[in-house]
Amino acid sequence: MSSVHEIGAHASQDRLEKFLAERLTPGADRAAVDARIWNLFGETWAVMFTDLSGFSRHVAEFGIVHFLQVIYEAQRIFTPCVDSNDGILLKVEGDSMLIIFRTVASALQCAIDMQRTAKDYNAGKPQEEHILQCIGLGYGPVLRIGDSDVFGSEVNAASKLGEDTAQAWEILVTASVQSAAEAAEIPGLHFQPIPDIPPGASSASRLLYDL
């Protein structure tokens, strides 16, 4: 059983590497290779990147072990939000999580659930143990490589919004997310444009929600 899982985990990456090697061959028809890559790996997903506010400051002040505890607790309390909104946690790197969703509605609801969960968790705890979540969302065509990673302009934009631009409690979204939410007529959602537009997105906005 373990050998079957191992093959499945690496098959997509191996196939992609073969395509890339073919693309580098002199005289290769790169457009044709690209089309095959998108045909095999191209999918449409909502992409979420999360980050914890104040990582460097807290590590310097309280030590890495303390912050490892905060990261552990963040993953523990947010995983049920991901599960209940049908998300797939692809990757955890330090204090950041990469999560994908089939629909923008699920991604937005998960983001709101995470922030409300963090608020409830922080109640009564000392400031240094507070979980302060930053979230960035993108939506559109991506290359999904098995259950390990996704690539695309909306992935890059969501990463920039969640890990670099968003402040504590903020949910920042690309224009594609806002357009999909408005097209689906999701009630109770309002967006406020922000000046920091990440590469790969035509615009970006802050989700206004009741915490």
Image (cartoon, rainbow, N blue to C red):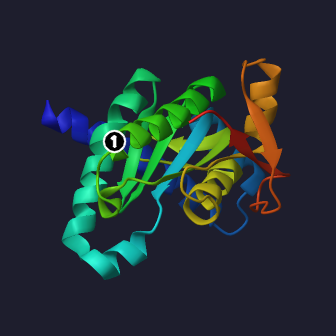
| Above or below, comparing residue 2 to residue 184 in the picture | below
**The disc labelled 1 sits on which kind of residue?**
Tyr
| Above or below, comparing residue 61 to residue 121 in the picture | below
Where residue 175 sits, quadrant-wise, is top right
| Above or below, comparing residue 95 to residue 139 in the picture | below
Relative depth, front residue between 100 and 29: 100
Find disc 1 in the rendering and name its residue.
121
Figure quadrant of the N terminus? top left
Q: Position of residue 118 (x, y in %)?
A: 41, 42
The furthest residue to the front? 124
Q: Position of residue 88 (x, y in %)?
A: 43, 33
- What is the tally of numbered marks visible in this picture? 1
Residue drawn 77% across and 33% down?
A: 190
Crowd rating for badge 1 (residues with CA inside 10 Å; few <14, some 14–19, many 20+): some
On the rendered structure, is 163 left or right of 192? left
Relative depth, front residue between 70 and 197: 70
Figure quadrant of the C terminus? top right
Relative depth, front residue between 182 and 37: 182
Q: Position of residue 116 (x, y in %)?
A: 47, 35
Camera sees residue 161: yes
